[in-house]
Amino acid sequence: MIIDNSVNNSMFDHFKSLSGITFKYNGFSKKNMSFKFAKIVWEVIEDTYDGNRSQLDWVVYGDQNCNFHNNFEEDSYLEEWNDVKTKEYEVFCGWVLRKSNNGEVILMIGTDYTDEYYPATVLDTYS
């Protein structure tokens, strides 16, 4: 079966094109694997391998009617991180949202490669 990922590619390219530009961040839902940034609800799609391992596959448009319990408006910008060591992860690859006023990381979107055999998708606050 051949899968056409051109639509997912286009949405993911749109997401990545927002890097470095300040927009409002309005919260996230770990349960729905979604967040609102730049007036768009984005959904994180996992490549789940075998159920024990996962990694970020796509960031695509999500349910635009989704509500977040932690709704707020924070000026922030998107930044790509590759092979970055954080407080929680030895090797993180993906994107972060940073507050525009002080650079504080407020959301991580990507994959934790700390255990190369068991990577894990990340959509969470920076801890």
Image (cartoon, grey):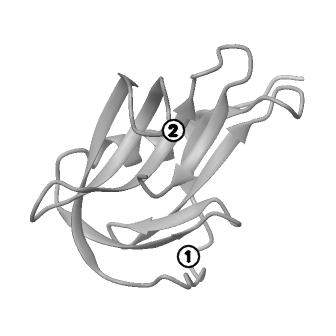
Badge number at residue 110: 2
Q: In which image quadrant can residue 98 be found?
A: bottom left
Residue situated in front as seen by the camera: 75 or 119: 119
Q: In which image quadrant can residue 40 be found?
A: bottom left
Q: Cβ–Cβ below 8 Å for labels 1 and 2? A: no
Badge number at residue 48: none
Describe the element under mark 2 as helix, strand or loop.
strand
The picture places residue 13, in percent across and down from the top left corner, at: 41, 39
Q: Residue at left 44%, top 34%?
A: 94
The picture places residue 52, in percent across and down from the top left corner, at: 85, 31
Describe the element under mark 1 as helix, strand or loop.
loop
Q: Is residue 106 visible?
A: yes
Does residue 40 appear left or right of residue 25 in this picture? right
Residue situated in front as seen by the camera: 89 or 53: 89
Does residue 61 appear left or right of residue 2 in this picture? left
Residue 40, compared with residue 57, is above or below; it is below
> In front: mark 1 or mark 2?
2
Q: Is residue 7 visible?
A: no
- The residue lying furthest to the top in this view is 116
**Label 1 Cα crowd, 10 Å radius (few <14 / some 14-19 / many 20+):** few
Residue 115, compared with residue 40, is above or below; it is above
Q: Amino acid at mark 1?
A: Gln
Q: In which image quadrant can residue 111 be found?
A: top right
The picture places residue 43, in percent across and down from the top left corner, at: 59, 57
> Label 1 belongs to which residue?
64
Quadrant of the rendering where the N terminus is positioned: top right
Q: CA distance from mark 1 to mark 2?
A: 21 Å
Does residue 51 appear left or right of residue 13 in this picture? right
Q: Amino acid at mark 2?
A: Gly
Residue 79, compared with residue 84, is above or below; it is below
Q: Earlier in the sequence, mark 1 or mark 2?
A: 1
Q: Residue at left 39%, top 35%?
A: 86
